[in-house]
Image (cartoon, grey):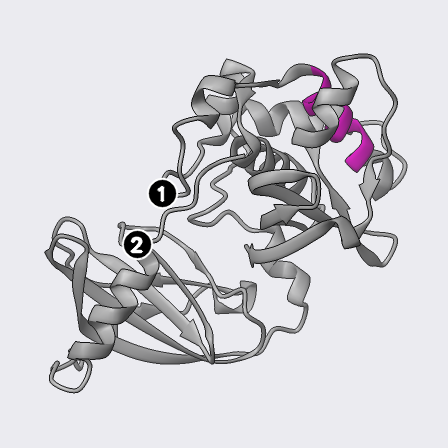
Amino acid sequence: MFKRHMRISTIVIFFILLISTTSFAQNTIVDVNNLDKGMVSINYNSKSNMKVYITKGNNKEHYDLKPNANYPLQFGDGEYTIMILEYVSGNQYKPVATEKVNLKLKDENQLYLQSNEMIKWNDNMAAIKKAKELTKGARNDEEKVKAIHDYITANIKYDDKKASTATTIYTPAIDDTFSSQSGICYDYAVLTAGMLRGVDIPTKLNMGYKSDIKDYHAWNEVYVNGKWEIIDTTYNAAYVQNNASIEIFKNAKEYKLEKSY
């Protein structure tokens, strides 16, 4: 559980005020080398505190602009507008470059196997090596999911102190959570996604609300047996670590999705 931060709406308001008067750069800013995997990166000489703002229809997301970062296009096939926002003052930004790209994936699940700005992983990470070790004898994808779910829920402890102060601004580092063996729901969900993607299980990082949890929450969806199933390692850890039984796959009616990566 963690606190939401409302700076996205502030950026959008300032953007609306300035869009009619801003001159956009003409050079190509979007690197589409990984577009077939549902991601883009940005070619732009960035100053400090700049943002990447991605929209498709009414869907929007923003990220810090970083070199060599991959940004997911998670709103499905179609035309995306990608903008670079430059810091002005306070929580205000102005658009300085824009470009459109068209996404048409052969396999939409490819996006949910990748390392990107929200879920950064690679095969050299201790957490990914552990995931491969845990699933070495797995006969199918469901057994892989169970092995990693069981490890995380048994070993990662919930950090109550962090829960009282954390916001959605920070992005969890997978190996930090793995080495500390502690975190909040955001950390659990990013670790779960990274470990499962590392063993070729398409996995989503979801954010929103659970019916019996009052605070903002993070959980995962995994693609197994031809369909998406919800897993919630944070929620299940409380049961597992108190020697109580709990189902791995959750009822979708208990969750209200706001964001998915």
Do the residues under discs 2 and 1 have CB atoms within 8 angstroms? yes
Q: Is-magenta flag for residue 146?
A: yes
The disc at residue 27 is none
Residue located 32% across and 51% down the image: 68
Residue under numbered circle 2 = 7
Residue 113 placed where, x, y %? 62, 51
Name the residue tied to disc 1: 169
* Residue 249 coordinates in the image, percent (x, y): 83, 42
Determine whether the residue tagged by mark 2 lies in a helix, strand or loop. helix
Q: Amino acid at mark 1?
A: Ile
Instruction: Relative to 235, say whether 96 is above or below.
Output: below
Name the foreground residue: 50 vs 30: 50
> Mark 1, residues whose alpha carbon is within 10 Å: few (<14), some, or many (≥20)?
few
Amino acid at dot 2: Arg
Question: Mark 1 falls on what kind of element?
Answer: loop
The magenta-colored residue range is: 145-154
104 displayed left or right of 11: right
Q: Is residue 151 left or right of residue 251?
A: left
**Residue 236 picture location, percent across and down:** 74, 28
Q: Badge 2, how many Cα within 10 Å: few under 14, some, many 20+?
A: few
